[in-house]
Image (cartoon, coloured by chain):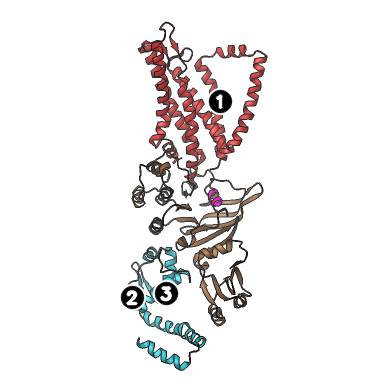
Amino acid sequence: MNRFNGVLKLHTVSPDSKFGWMGLPWLILFSSFLINLILSMLLNKDKGLYTGGLSSIFIYMFIAGIIGVNRTFPFALGFSIRRTDYFLGTSVVFCLVSLLDAVLLYLLSFIEFNLTDNWGTQLHFFHLPYISDGNALEQVGVYFFGMLHLCFLAFVITALYRRVGMLGLYIASGIIFAPFSILTILATYYNWWGDIFNWLGQFSAFGIVLLLCPLTALYALASYGLLRKATV
Amino acid sequence: MSLLIDDSSPIFVQIAERIENDIIEGQLPEETQVPSTNQFAAFYQINPATAAKGVNLLVDQGILYKKRGIGMFVAEGARVKLMEKRRAQFFEQYIVTMVREAEKLGITLQQLTEMIQKGGKA
Amino acid sequence: MSKVVEVTRLTKAYKDVKAVDEVSFSIEEGKIYGLLGRNGAGKTTIMHIISAQLFLTGGEVKVFGETPFENEQVLSQICFIKESQKFPEIYRVQDVMEVAAALFPNWDRAYAASLIKDFNLPPRRKIKKLSRGMLSSVGIIIGLASRAPLTIFDEPYLGLDAVARSLLYDRLLEDYTEHPRTIILSTHLIDEVSKLLEHVIVIDQGKLLIDEETETLRGQAVTVVGPALKVQEFASGKKVIHREAIGSLASATLLGNVGAFERKQAQTLGLELAPVSLQQLIVQLTTDKPERKVA
């Protein structure tokens, strides 16, 4: 375990990689925010502008996860790092970044809702209904577990790629999405959507992300298993 | 990248021969210290174990001896021993070859002897 | 002398091709080994398996007495520098060094710094902007400064000019002398490096061909040149590994010790004896060339 911090260093040592984990996602988020802010200034002030721009940072974290793992795994193996240590170290990086992002997002949401009265322009960017419904801890939790889920999804996809290559990835996604597609078609045909949404509706946002946790854990386990079989 | 070591024979043999040459030519008098194996290795860019093999060859033959903690020294009587060895080799290496070559070129023994005398003076 | 690496009937098979075929050898502590052979012979595969980056399909590998896979005890003592090392492109030279410092327990910062100066590496330049030679220098510096008890270099000097290569050999010897460790050097430039090697292992088409002390191998072959018939006469009964002919002249490379008696015999026959370098020897043993006739 003594090379664990080496893996942390691996992900964060270069200024460019630090930028990739923290700088760029926030840059993207703030660009989205600015655009929406300007829009909200120009639009009708009565209704308020509710926007999904917040999702940009989540999407970008997903991409950062893929890039980060793909770039560092062969490097790590080449330096004779154990796959176990790589997995643990990378997981810790994901947790730390997700936590940091979650706390910052909560703070911005607090500023938006509680301090600046929606930036004076009725912009609802960080503080959104349903998502921001819980108490402070729950709100941070929503961001944290949501982001963690995406990070590990990125991890397992990249691990799969490293294990089975591009072709394998196509085949695997085909195999996984086939049942989903079928279920979706059936759901539409039998009108299950109403029931599904009703069932989901009983959960708060925090509840939903908690439901995602087992899935996140599954991704993590799968990533570990795949990495153990991956070669450089 | 030293051109002093070639492919003609094992390197350790060539190292030993170098040291022998230095002893015969008087550059390494008796009881003087010989460079360490690491120094040889660094100079010729060869493996230290190989250098050591060459030095040990001479130790086995009584040409060099080891002073504990200090290094390798030229043994007493080393030069004499080497001269004897070289003299024995001289006949095979030079005389036989020369006579054979002379035969090939049709030089008579008389002419050969004259040449030798001339050669010595040049 | 303890065995740092023990390879027993190692096999790596891909569907119907055997990249490595029942290779067995062992590497003893504190020596410099050469792992030689043509491209695709299987040497790189073997090194990847030793460092747990590839999985074997048959046989066994033990490093420091244990299997290397996911074994921290073993893996933290290995430094494998290869020609195709995948450094993250956006990382700078000093970033890579920082990571290496955190990963190799015996890393020597001062030594690494002095090597960076020796090889003229710009520390703040990104990997993607480095020339082939500079990239090789990064690998070499890491390999040397890691002071890993088992250090493996796979073609470490691609793109390095002769001066830089000489610098590499100097530094390698220097460090090896002061801080002995087990080193495996895999290379094409056999002659240049052969003086550094204590022991030579040659792999040909996935199989072990030679496993011998360098000095024993040296002088084990000789090339005989002269009139074709005389060469034939001299070579009969001996192991011939290479022949060439030009006009009525022929040459044959013979394997085996050529003693004083044979030398005299050659002289009598009017044949010339020429030494065979280690590189020539290995090239001729690993190439299936039909007899060549020139002009």
Q: Residue furthest front?
A: C295
Name the residue type under label 1.
Answer: Leu
**Relative height, residue C151 to residue B102 (above, below):** above
Name the residue type under label 2.
Answer: Leu
Secondary structure of the residue carrying numbered label 3: helix
Q: Is residue A89 magenta?
A: no
Q: Which chain is red?
A: A
Q: Is residue C45 magenta?
A: yes
User: Chain B takes which shade in the image?
Assistant: cyan
Residue that numbered label 1 is attached to: A215
Parent chain of label 2: B
What count of labels does the image hold? Answer: 3
Badge 3 vs badge 2, beta-carbon distance below 8 Å: no
Residue that numbered label 2 is attached to: B28
> Magenta region: which residues?
C43-48
Residue that numbered label 3 is attached to: B17
Residue A103: image quadrant is top left
